Amino acid sequence: MKKIFKGMENGPEAIDSNFNELADPKRDQVFHDLTVDGRLSGKSTREVVQMDFGPAIFWRFGPLVLMYVAVEYKNMYTSPWGYMGGFMVPAGYRPIEKTVVNVINDFKTTQATIDLNGALMATDTEYNSKTMLEIQGSWMTNDDYRN
Amino acid sequence: MKWYFKYNPQTFELLSGAVYAEEQPSNSTAVDPAGTPFPVFNVTKQSWESDPVKLAELEERQKKQPQVQDVQNQIADLYARVLNQEMKGM
């Protein structure tokens, strides 16, 4: 923003430049407090990310991420408290802190965690390939958007 | 445009908030820490390495995990024991 003062040269151009800067939709803005009397919506995206074992679906609404994976377990491997091979949350969706997600396998529910680096750590000792493996979770991200 | 992953300039531990930009932010790298447990950035090698203390703690936890036997194996084991007892009683 340029300062406008009495008698300045190119005053109209400076005003125009300031106005354009204010009107730029890509302008970064920081608010101390912001109250919205209505719906507050952010950019939302949906992406199917192909992993080693199959597709994983990621939704993002502002900083909130939802993930859903439903695959046959046969192409995945893990050990208790170990990273699940072939699974990686891509940049753009990674959590701000280690987060817990739900896992359904062999007709029982267990939990896993996702680290800051996007890897999924299994906490169960028993995963088997007889039934579908479902992983579902939601968390907050501080990453930039992927597109 | 590239992804950059930020690290703490004092501890070199990974920070949340990957940046997608044309210019590299300070204290960041284009090397993805994906797959490295407890990632700490090695500036000399320009690679992520695991924090040895935290990794050792994890390995200790892995060792303590009880080995759960498959249900079918448990039944087979139980059946063999019962059969063995019956044979002794004959």
Image: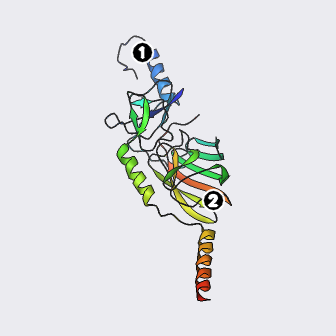
| Quadrant of the rendering where the C terminus of chain A is positioned | top right
Looking at marks 1 and 2 on the same chain, the residue that comes earlier in the sequence is marked by 1
Residue at (31, 35) in percent of width and height: B10
Nearer to us in this view, B15 or B13:
B13
Q: Nearer the viewer, mark 1 or mark 2?
A: 2
Q: Provide the residue designation for mark 1.
A: A11
Residue A101's disc number: none
Left or right of A17? Residue B72 is: right
Residue B87 horizontal/vertical position (percent):
62, 84
Residue at (55, 48) in percent of width and height: A65
Q: Is residue A29 visible?
A: no
Residue A30 horizontal/vertical position (percent):
41, 37
Nearer to us in this view, A32 or A129:
A129
Residue at (39, 44) in percent of width and height: A33
Whole-angstrom CA distance, mark 1 to mark 2, is 73 Å
Please report, as a chain letter, where disc 1 is located: A
Which amino acid type is marked by label 1?
A: Gly
Task: Describe the colour scheme in one phrase.
Answer: rainbow
SS of the residue under disc 1: helix
Q: In which quarter of the image is residue B72?
A: bottom right
Residue A113 versus residue A116 in the image, above or below: below
Please report, as a chain letter, where disc 2 is located: A
Residue A128's disc number: 2
- Crowding at dot 1, Cα within 10 Å, few <14 / some 14-19 / many 20+, comes out as some
Residue B19 horizontal/vertical position (percent):
48, 33
Which amino acid type is marked by label 2?
A: Asn
